[in-house]
Amino acid sequence: MYTEDCQKIFPDLQPDTKYRFYVSTMLNDQYSEAVSATINTESLLREMLSMIGLQDQYDKLTLSTVMKINQNDTSENKLETSHSEAFLKKLMMLNANARNVRCVPCDEYTHKNKTINPMDLITALILCSDSFLQQNIVSKMALCQFAVPLLLPNCETKEVTLMLWSMREIVRNVTPSNQARRLRCEERIVFSNIPLVSFVRLGKAVLSKSQILNKLFSNTDTFHHRNMVCGNVARKISNGLVEISWYLPCGKSNVDKFNEPLAVANLRGDIQIFDKQFKFLCQTSAVIYIFCDESETDYFKHLESKDVKGNVILISSFQEKSFTLKMMTMEPQLKITDITQKKKTDAELTKALNESISRMLENCPSKVSLENLVDTACLYGFLVDENSDYCKSARENANAITKHVRNTSEFKEKQLIYQGHIWKVISWLETECWRLRRAGNRNTEDYRTYLMRKERGHRRSQQQFEMTAAISSFFHGVSSEVQRYYFLKWLEMDLDNLSREELSVLKDRYKELSQTFPQDCEKIAEIDKQISVHSLCLDHFFRECGQLYECVDCLPEHSSQRKNIQQLPALCAQMLLDGFPLELVDGDVANIPMKWITEVLTQLHYILQSNSKLKVITIIGAENSGKSTLLNTMFGVRFAVSKGRCTRGAFIQVITVNKDISEELGCDCIIIIDTEGLKLDQLVQDDHSHERDREVASLAVALSDATIVSIFKDTSSKQDILEKVLHAFTRLKDVGTKPLCHFVHSNMSDMERTGGRRTGQDLMEELNQMIQKDTRMKKANVTKISDVMEFDPDTCSRDIPPLWDGTPPMAHFSVEYSETAHALKKQLIGDLKRCKNRGDLTHFTRRVESFWKAL
């Protein structure tokens, strides 16, 4: 090969192959002596990582990296990005079109005219992610109704991994149609004991197996197929992948395709090549459907030696013009029997498959749970993603706590003693010290001195408590850096499993009563109290850590217990950076453990090496209006979401900002604050915390640079909530704080969301009228909305579409909802550029303390 260039590209070299090159130069028809070099080309995986811009990220990608704010979040124009980043950004915002990103290589010079199959992209991203990002990616894929990896191949190591850990977070609702009472059952999907139906291919593809599966089970693109964007591009690293999805009935006969829940597995590639994956499915499936051509049936003589637990049915095609379902029996000898007549269209084939699966479900003894597939996976030499020593040890540490939980209320009383009755009394005394509501005829200073003396007495009583076994185990779990995240995730999931059934019933009842019978305030208040009593989650353990730290000064200076407790703020700061929320306001007692919060945020300031200039985005509004879900969708954060009454108090999460844009944005990180929902007047409880939600809302607004106000369109509650929002903003007038404000409207009908309405202008007029009628606002010299907030009616009022597209549990996250959230996020970050710098995390903690006392 001759060339006049100093560089030469060889586009047709095979991956992971050794080549020897001989090079000589020619001058005046004379050749130099040849010089040789041996070069080993990159593996397919490394080539793929290079194409998607992750060549330096193998097994290193983390959730905090993916969440980081970058130029694409701040630029008004769409910037060029790697398709790995484009996919992850869309997936983190639960956009069901995430797989439709145009998969073109990052380096088009090196990989000219090469496109990438999205299945390769997903496989490469999961292989590049740490265990915790893998779990996050898979959870969000499930919410988008994408099939998720069950058996993940690594073409470089030739290993296959059962992805059990990555599916642990998936929780789904199911209502089998044969249940007399039509109860919705919510459980973690890895525990569900249901039939597994598998679909595989023998030989060349005769039709799109994945497209048939989509028509059969969901009518959505659960399984990526050849007719989708880049679906016709040859797969390079994802062959051998076994995906899994679930069919879950909703309990409506006119909607459900099957009466019972089932799992659906799909093997990518030919079973002649991926024999181990096929054997695994033969052992675990209630039925296996094999797509093949009539000419390939001789292969099945080899099945006589295979151990097949369920039925095997061939979907035999003839020149892609007709299809026949054939039953295979192995004993006493291999036999193939037609069970349908020839089907000539996809619709006819889909109907035949539906009837076949329905018959299987009528009496199916073969059921499996994902958690019970570990032994079978190991039998075939597969790895299991949660079989690492760190993960196992962390699970044992979490189990040491949860195995003692029989009754959540009793457990909290005996094991989480620092946040018990005494902390509630201390909180009341602190509040009363500032409010002096019960001073009566007493001298106010004498009364305050009396309250402070009682508070010190209760603190001394609190300091006498010994550390309990549960908290000692918690300390042990979080003290190991390599196990900490595993431990926290195991504990979080195990606690959720323990309380889900009871809390689910209470939250359903609370939601039903508060929306249907809001006048029945006593029952609603009692259910609210029961939700608090029966709740037990990770927040309670962090809250206990905060109370321990508040009392640390009473311990001997050089004691090991004191040293352990003093390490807690730094550990919690790192966890905050890793994506765990921090409770700012204790939702049960309406108080802030100021010493604890100050030290955690100070430690975070040190971890960020003093680069902690920040901006704050807050959400307030009606309870159960989807505030936490909206924040999670916009920023990829992890605020707790559930049906019914959820967030209590206030929580913060931290997102870092890429250094390239920190100067433009005027901050190094963004704090997101999620708050307790504002209750309607008739739902307010007659106790010392009856103004808790208003105080929390006022604090959040005071701290924020930009505030989102979430309200229902429903007119019966909208006026009440808007009035509370206005009072929260009015409290800040004397402080000189006037945040930017965005209103989002949820619970709207399709007709209301159609064009032609003056949403923002109408809202501004409504708010101004409310101000003019309110005597308290007149006393505060507030005459119009612009006196208390920055609000542009043309750009700062937005309708939020419904969350789900379709009927749950088979509905996927609405693309319209996701894109609306993305547009709001972009606008909010643009707003932050205009906000003045109010300092770093140390300044923020001082603002928290001063505003809370003022409130």
Image: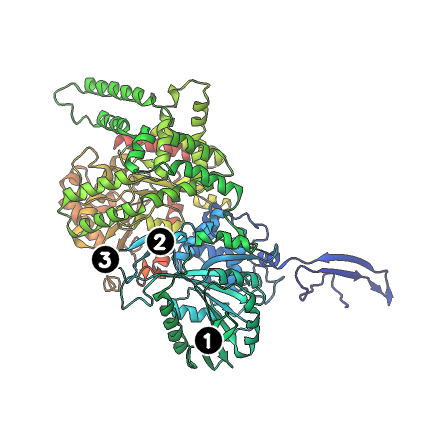
Q: Is residue 66 above or below residue 736?
A: below
Whole-percent x, y for residue 396 in the image: 45, 39
- Nearest-to-viewer mark from 2 and 1: 1
Marks 2 and 1, the one that precedes in the sequence: 1
SS assignment at label 3: loop
Question: Distance between the Cα atoms at labels 1 and 3?
Answer: 38 Å
In-front residue for pair 836/307: 307
Whole-percent x, y for residue 97 in the image: 42, 62
Quick check: marks 1 and 3 in contact, CB under 8 Å? no
Whole-percent x, y for residue 181 in the image: 23, 57
Question: Distance between the Cα atoms at labels 2 and 1?
Answer: 53 Å
- Nearest-to-viewer mark from 1 and 3: 1
Residue holding disc 1:
326
Residue holding disc 2:
824
Location of residue 599 (image quadrant) = top left
Marks 3 and 2, the one that precedes in the sequence: 3
Q: Can residue 838 be seen by looking at this rendering?
A: no
Q: Is residue 814 left or right of residue 289?
A: left
Whole-percent x, y for residue 477 in the image: 45, 35
Residue type at mark 2 is Leu
SS assignment at label 1: strand
Residue type at mark 3 is Arg
